[in-house]
Amino acid sequence: MNTFFHHRHHLRSLISIPRIPISRPLDFFVRSPVVAAPKMANAASGMAVNDDCKLKFLELKAKRTYRFIIFKIDEKQKQVVVEKLGEPNLTYDDFTTSLPTNECRYAIYDFDFVTEENCQKSKIFFIAWSPDTSRVRSKMLYASSKDRFKRELDGIQVELQATDPTEMGLDVIRGRAN
């Protein structure tokens, strides 16, 4: 008798591994109960997006009606909504002071600049504002909803992630615009 087979056979008898008949080897798997994975709320798909968000973004993009738009997640409505609209004459400082210091937000900023060739240009920035001082739950909610929200806004040219004001300073915006 083969030594390997002999040892294997001997081990099987010691630990009593149940034998599955060869004629139906998959019976065990077919009859196993199916356990559904728990659903993760908003993890994969993100929050719903209020139609007003898309409408205001299109107005900013096509008609230049606004300098910036600040969006927030309304947890009761379970959707992203427009929180503030910045008039076209407002500055970048007006925009940054409109962001809360300890709460997450999404923002769109229409940045005008002049190229080295002296051409007037504009770039639309998407800014994910997630300050270090905001609640962990809020940071997770905004992070998990960001991609779905961005997909709804067609025409974003530059994306920034900022956790403190220095990460989205005017110098950073200028550098990313070129």
Image (cartoon, rainbow, N blue to C red):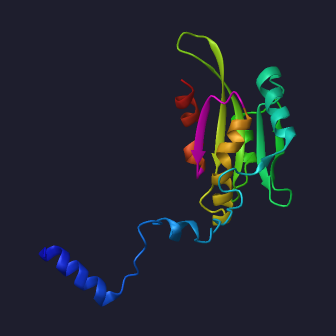
Residue occupying image coordinates x 81% and y 35%: 54
Visible residue check, residue 128: yes
Which of 168 and 160 lies nearest the eye of the viewer? 160
- Let me know if residue 67 is in the magenta part: no
Visible residue check, residue 89: no
Compared with 121, 31 (above or below) is below
Residue 64 picture quarter: top right
Residue 167 picture quarter: top right
Q: Quadrant of the N terminus?
A: bottom left
Residue occupying image coordinates x 40% and y 77%: 19
Image coordinates for residue 78, horizontal then vertical, percent: 81, 56
Compared with 161, 54 (above or below) is above
Compared with 154, 9 (above or below) is below
Which of 4 and 161 lies nearest the eye of the viewer? 4
Q: Is residue 136 left or right of residue 84?
A: left
Image coordinates for residue 34, horizontal then vertical, percent: 62, 68
Which of 157 and 24 lies nearest the eye of the viewer? 24
Image coordinates for residue 24, horizontal then vertical, percent: 48, 66
Q: Is residue 116 left or right of residue 126?
A: left
The residue stretch that appears in magenta: 154-164
Residue occupying image coordinates x 57% and y 16%: 115
